[in-house]
Amino acid sequence: MTTVTRRGEVVRLNGELPSVGQTAPDFLLTRTDLTDVSLADYEGFRKVLSIVPSLDTPTCAMSARRFNQDATALEDTVVLNISADLPFAAARFCETEGLERVEALSMMRDRRFASDYGVLQLDGPMAGLSARAVVVLDRDNSVIYAELVPEIRQEPDYDAALRALS
């Protein structure tokens, strides 16, 4: 079992983040228009999975803005912001923030994503939400970068994640 911290307090997670070289687990997530998607919907693209607890927190919002900014330079790549937020809230956030280069996906219908990716928080005030992580996949859904952010309130290493795509 993996742990991270939130404000210095230890938070247990349900498992391990997929490792570099592994095939990423498939998922069922919901877009802001309420349609469901899986990895197959992004076939042929490289994928940056920006996994966050909620876009309604300052660090998650900063992360979404940063990946939206950096996404313009990425060819054949989709950036997916994945959270437990309802699609309505995620759509409102993206519209308010002017985020047009990232896609917000929700675990609304299927929380297995957090379990399958080993980021489900088991205790603490945000139990049931995901920890903060970034997983980068190649076109064949093989993990080429994985970062579990050790302190939930800390931003991920954007540069390292994007370098994995070079």
Image: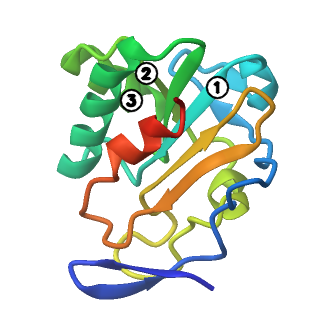
Where does residue 120 sit, x and y in percent of width and height? Answer: 57, 67
Please report the residue visible at 74 percent of the width from the left and 37 percent of the height from the top: 28
Visible residue check, residue 45: yes
Circle 1 — which element?
strand
Amino acid at circle 1 = Arg
Please give the residue where the numbered disc 3 appears in the rendered image: 90
Quarter in which the N terminus is drawn: bottom right
Earlier sequence position, callout 3 versus callout 1: 1
Amino acid at circle 2 = Val
Visible residue check, residue 130: no
Q: Does residue 77 lie above or below 158 as drawn?
A: above
Q: Nearer the viewer, mark 1 or mark 2?
A: 1
Q: Nearer the viewer, mark 2 or mark 3?
A: 2
Alpha carbons under labels 1 and 2: distance apart: 13 Å
Where does residue 165 sit, x and y in percent of width and height? Answer: 54, 31
Please give the residue where the numbered disc 1 appears in the rendered image: 46
Circle 2 — which element?
loop
